[in-house]
Amino acid sequence: MEFLSGNFLCETIVPKGELIVSRTDLKGNITYANETFALISGYEVDELIGRSHNIVRHPDMPKVIFKELWEDLKSKGSWSGIVKNLRKDEGFYWVFAEISGVFKDGKLVEYKSVRTPISFDEKLKYQLLYDELKKQNNEPIRKVVYQ
Ligand SMILES: Cc1cc2nc3c(=O)[nH]c(=O)nc-3n(C[C@H](O)[C@H](O)[C@H](O)COP(=O)(O)O)c2cc1C
């Protein structure tokens, strides 16, 4: 029999009014994480600091989105978009993310990101869109557990 099982089916809802905030160095290594980021992702703040931000990369996210994210950060200085993120327990949470530069004496020193909740309709729309993008690029879509 074929069925899906595991925490990867469990969504954590980002409460309205909550902001998930992080900063990274210019390579995407986390230098700051707020308490909400830790709570929603299932990590301790200390576990997040120093790790690559791809620690919360969800396998449902198409590669091309992160390619665009880094290209836009380098060319325009900012990026915003909808991201499905992976929790430590393999559950997931959806956010609208805005990323931009942090400047010191006019010099780009870090990136910062603020994330807010999105609606159920947006989650459905983006899950289908991201599946389609993965299909177009021959990336595997969702894992199925055979038991
Ligand atoms: C400030 C900032 C915040 C980021 N936030 C996320 C995030 O919430 N989720 C995510 O998957 N990638 C995020 N990224 C992109 C990651 O650095 C990484 O490029 C992405 O997870 C894909 O992993 P990969 O580059 O190892 O393929 C962020 C990058 C920056 C600079």
Image (cartoon, grey):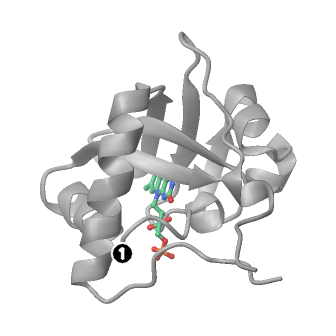
Query: Within 8 Å: ligand 1 and the Cβ of disc 1?
Result: yes
Q: Residue furthest front?
A: 1
Q: Is mark 1 on a helix, strand or loop?
A: helix
Which percent across, then down, holds residue 84? 49, 50
Q: In this view, does 9 lie to the left or right of 131?
A: right
Q: Is residue 1 visible?
A: yes
Along the line of sight, the residue nearer the viewer: 23 or 16: 16
Along the line of sight, the residue nearer the viewer: 125 or 17: 125
Residue under the image location 71 percent in, 58 percent down: 8
CA neighbours of label 1 inside 10 A, class few (<14), some (14 to 19), many (20+): some
Q: Which residue lies furthest to the left in this view?
A: 76
Q: Residue 20 lies in what quarter of the image? A: top right
Give above or below for 15 relative to 71: above
Image quadrant in which the N terminus is located: bottom right
Residue under the image location 75 percent in, 28 percent down: 35
Q: How many labels does the image show?
A: 1
Q: Which residue was labeled with disc 1?
A: 63
Which percent across, then down, holds residue 112? 45, 40
Give above or below for 136 relative to 80: below
Give above or below for 133 relative to 53: below
Along the line of sight, the residue nearer the viewer: 31 or 78: 78
Q: Residue furthest top?
A: 17
Q: Is residue 52 visible?
A: no
Give above or below for 2 relative to 39: below
Which percent across, then down, holds residue 13? 63, 29
Identify which amino acid the numbered label 1 is placed on.
Answer: Lys
Q: Residue 40 lies in what quarter of the image? A: top right
Residue under the image location 78 percent in, 33 percent down: 39
Which percent across, then down, holds residue 133? 25, 70
